[in-house]
Structure formats: structure tokens, C-alpha cells
Image (cartoon, rainbow, N blue to C red):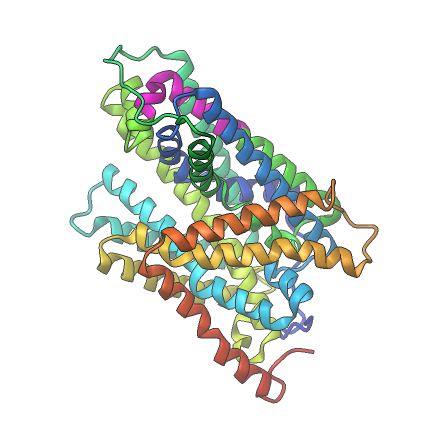
Amino acid sequence: MTVDPAAGARPQALLSPMDGLALIVGVVIGIGIFKAPALVAARFDDPLVILSLWLAGAVIMAVGALCYAELASAWPDAGGEYHFLARAFGPAVGFLFAWGRLVVIQTGSIALVAFVFGDYAQRLLDLGPHGASIYAALAVIVVAGANVAGTRLSARIQRVVAASLVAAVAVTALLGFVITPEPTAPVAAVAGTGTTSGSLAAAMGSAMIFIMLTYGGWNEAAYLSAELRDVKRNMVRVAVGATVVIGFLYLTINVAYLRVLGVGGLGASTAPGADYMEALLGPPGAAVLSGVVVIAALSTLNATIFTGARSAYAMGRDVRLLAVLGRWDGRAQGPVAAHLIQAAIALGLVGIGTVTRQGFATMVDFTAPVFWFFLTLTAAAVFVRRLRGGGEDTFCVPFYPFTPLLFCAVSATMLYAALAYTGVGALVGVGAVALGLPLWWAARRAPGGLAP
């Protein structure tokens, strides 16, 4: 599965480690850090337990990132996870993943982030009753357009936006240490750790669901492997660097939340970021936070669009029925057709979310089970690679087999949670992936349907 139909044009190693770091930081640091800390704090009355769980999330992210670094180092390809799954379990599994990523995982994530951008942009400048949806659609069009214009432009934009995001989150956290909020009436903790080990374990397990959702996105590093300079060394640097930056920022802002709001206040809040900023700066603090979230959403949107088009390109490169996706534009140094089709699907999902009037929740239900199912399979691909041997000169994850075993266990746990707690949107997402089965059957039967 290596033939490229795009007249000799193919991915080039143009991205520096700093570009890779900016993309991963931009994907991971999003709106979750302004919501999830309250859901975690609501389960405990000990700040040390809360902070320990956030630290554990950083460790799990590092474990997953190192496993992906091994796969990317051994099997570098613009298709990322698509290529890993095809190499480990066969082309049919790889195809279903890439199809699911195009019609569910990545396009649903793009629509989800666009809705968040729209909600907060609407607070800054009201465009009327449908303003949030208008902003969401415009964000997809503009950011996709920047990626169509070229990889170098997208990478430059991501550097600027990611740097602005890191600075904004860092300043937001710093305010909690340098400004003393007005005293308020104490708020009792809304939940404690309980009196039995069973209830404590359940609280920790449910809290980790929200924490890992907030750390989600590190796996997008896989899609940089064909365009990252000296991938065998730099993929590990990107993985470790992103973990350090993100883990430090998440721990710092949680300490700031706890200092300003207390465990009880944080756990009782429905919008902890807004409550935190209002406690520090008064009503103008809400506007400041809206600006920070807009930056976070733009950063995540650009990185998600960039990496999403790579797996679609790889699928089109290998499946002749979808060859339009597999065209690599030499001028733009990117998969222009894949970007356009991905953007069209994402805009359609924005329309669906607008009709349901629950855009964010609808997209979460739509994407979660499919995402965690394929991530669990990718975790297992590390064992397949080791069993087959070879690639001794590539990076190998330390403490094998315990490291990938932990990765598998966490992914399987998140899959269970996604199946247990999502609504009817999850069935729609699974159904959309199932539509790929007859398409694969047709591709296999058509003369020259698959690239050799």
C-alpha cells in the first residue's frame, strides 16, 4: 500500500520539531481545561488527590505518546494510525479506520470545536440568533482555506496561535497566584471521597474519564511522521516536549483554580473558568476568558484540520475508488482535495448540530465510541510490531511490555465509558463507519481497486 497516484508529488519532511510541538499542543489544550476541573473536583474533598489525578493523566499521555512514537518511527507515513492499523491487522481494518476518521472522528471533532468557537465568539460580537452557527461555519471555511493554501502557511499560523494559547493559559493561571480574590462565603464540598475503597475507586475512575478527555489529541502526532524532519529522533522529542508543556500548564491552572475557588467552589461550579476569572477581575473577566477560549478553539481547529486530511489522503492513495482524496498538491505541499472534502463533511455536521440545537453534545456522542475503539486497536499494534521483529534502529518504547499494556488498559476503559454514557448519536456514528464495509467490498472487487 505505497503507490501515490499524484503524479510524483508526495509528502516532504518540511516540519521542524517546533512545528510538531505547536500542532500537538494546539490540539490538546482546548476548551476541556475550562470545564473538566469542576467535574473532577466534585468527586473529592482533598486537593492533593485532585492534583495527583491530573498528574496521572499527564503520565498516561506520555505512555500513549511514547507508544505512538515507536509506531511512527518504525512505520512513518502520512496516514498515521491508518497506516499503523493496516500494517498490523491488514488493509481492511486500516480502511475502516480511515473511513471512520473521515466521516465521524475527525470531521465530528472539527464540528465540535467549531461550535465551541462559535459560542464564545458570539459572546464577544453578537451576530444574532444564529450567530454561533455562523461563526462555526466561518471558522471551518477560513481555517480549511488556510490549509488548502499550503502546509507552510498552516504551520506558521499554528506556531503563532499555539504560542498565543500557551501564553494565554499561562497568564490565566498566573493571575490566580498574583491577585487575591474578594472574600466570599465558604462553599461546602459537593462530594467527598466516600468511606469505602469501592466508592473511592469509582470516583477516581469517573474522574479519569474527564481528565483523559481533556488530555485527548496527543495521538495526532502520528500524522506528522511523513512530514517531520528526522522522524526517528524528533518524534520522541515532540511527544516528550508536548507532555511536559501540557502537563505543567494543566497542573498549574488546577492549582490556581483551587487557590481561588477552593475545592467546594470548584466542584460546585458549572463554568469554572468563567467563575475563576470573575472572582479575580470581576465581570470583565468573563470577556477575557471568552478571548482565551476563542484562541484555544482556533488552535485546536487548525491542528485537527491539518492532521485529519492526512489520513484521508492516505486512504485515497491506496483505494482507487477514492483516488480523488489521494492527490498530493506539490504547490501547496498538502492534500488539497482531502482538505476540501473534509471541510464539506464538517460543514454538514455543523448544519446537523445546528438543527438539533445541541451541537457540542451531539458531536461528542457521535465521535467518542468510534475514536476509542480504534485507539484500543492502535495500542495493540505495538505488540504486533514487536512480535514481527525488525526495525532495531528505530525508537522502542521503554519498559516493554508494561508500557503498552497500560496504554491498552486505559484505551479499553475509555471505550467502555464511551459506550456506557453516550446517547443515540453514538449509534449514528457507528452506522456511518459501517457504511464503509460495502465500499471496501466494492474496492476489493473492482479491477485495480487497491494500490499494490
* Closest to the observer, 266 or 452: 266
Q: How many marks?
A: 0
Image quarter in which the N terminus is found: bottom right
Residue at position x 43%, y 62% from top? 104
Quick check: is 279 in the magenta stretch? no
Farthest residue toward the front? 196
Up-down relation of residue 210 to residue 364 (above or below)? above
Q: Tell me which corner region of the image, top left, top right, bottom left or bottom right, holds residue 259.
A: top left
| Magenta segment main secondary structure | helix
Give residue 162's position: percent from left, percent from top: 49, 38
- Is residue 369 rendered to the left or right of residue 184? right
Residue 20 location (% of width, % of height): 60, 44
Residue range (magenta): 248-266
Location of residue 67 in the rendering, given as x and y in whole percent from the top left corner: 66, 47
Up-down relation of residue 30 to residue 53 (above or below): below
Residue 258 lies in the magenta-colored region? yes
Q: Is residue 405 left or right of residue 335?
A: right
Residue at left 34%, top 10%? 180
For image coordinates 52% across by 26% down, the residue present is 52
Q: Is residue 256 toward the left or the right of residue 437 in the image?
A: left
- Which x, y percent locates residue 235? 68, 45
Say whether residue 142 is visible.
no
